[in-house]
Image (cartoon, rainbow, N blue to C red):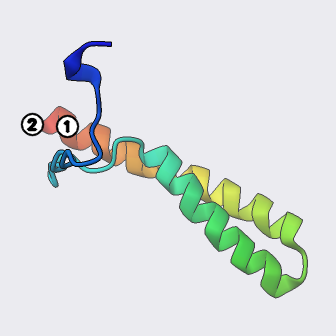
Amino acid sequence: MTEERRLSLTQQPEKKDKKKGLQNPRAAGIAIGVGVGLALGSAMDNVASGLAVGTALGVAIGAGMQRKRDSDSDEK
């Protein structure tokens, strides 16, 4: 393994570029949807259906965020 690829515990992580945004908006959308779905499912006493609805909602949110990011990058 070369020196460039080694990671150190004392090494500072690289700063994220705030203009760049999320690396994978679909994954973020699914994660948000799963969280909302679990909360909704526990409120309805039916976690399975809440999780399904939340995942579908998350996929839709993630796809919208991905499309917006792609259209913003095409305009520049």
The residue at 73%/71% (across/down) is 38
Q: Is residue 73 left or right of residue 36?
A: left
Q: Is any part of residue 10 visible from this angle?
A: yes
Quarter of the image where the C terminus is located: top left
Residue at image mark 2: 76
CA gap between label 1 and label 2 equals 6 Å
Q: Is residue 9 above or below residue 53?
A: above
63 relative to 1, above or below: below
Residue 12 vs residue 51, the one in the foreground: 12
In this rendering, does residue 63 appear at all? no
Regarding mark 2 in the picture, which secondary structure is present there?
Answer: loop
Question: Taking 32 as reference, is 20 left or right?
Answer: left
- Image quadrant holding the N terminus, namely top left
Could you say which quadrant of the image residue 58 lies in?
bottom right
Q: Which residue is mark 1?
A: 73
Most distant residue in the top direction: 1
| Res 47 → quadrant | bottom right
Q: Position of residue 48 (x, y in %)?
A: 87, 64
Q: In screen coordinates, is 35 left or right of 41? A: left
Q: Residue visible at 66% across and 62% down? A: 34
Residue in the picture at 51% in, 47% down = 27
Q: Residue flagged by tag 2: what amino acid is it?
A: Lys
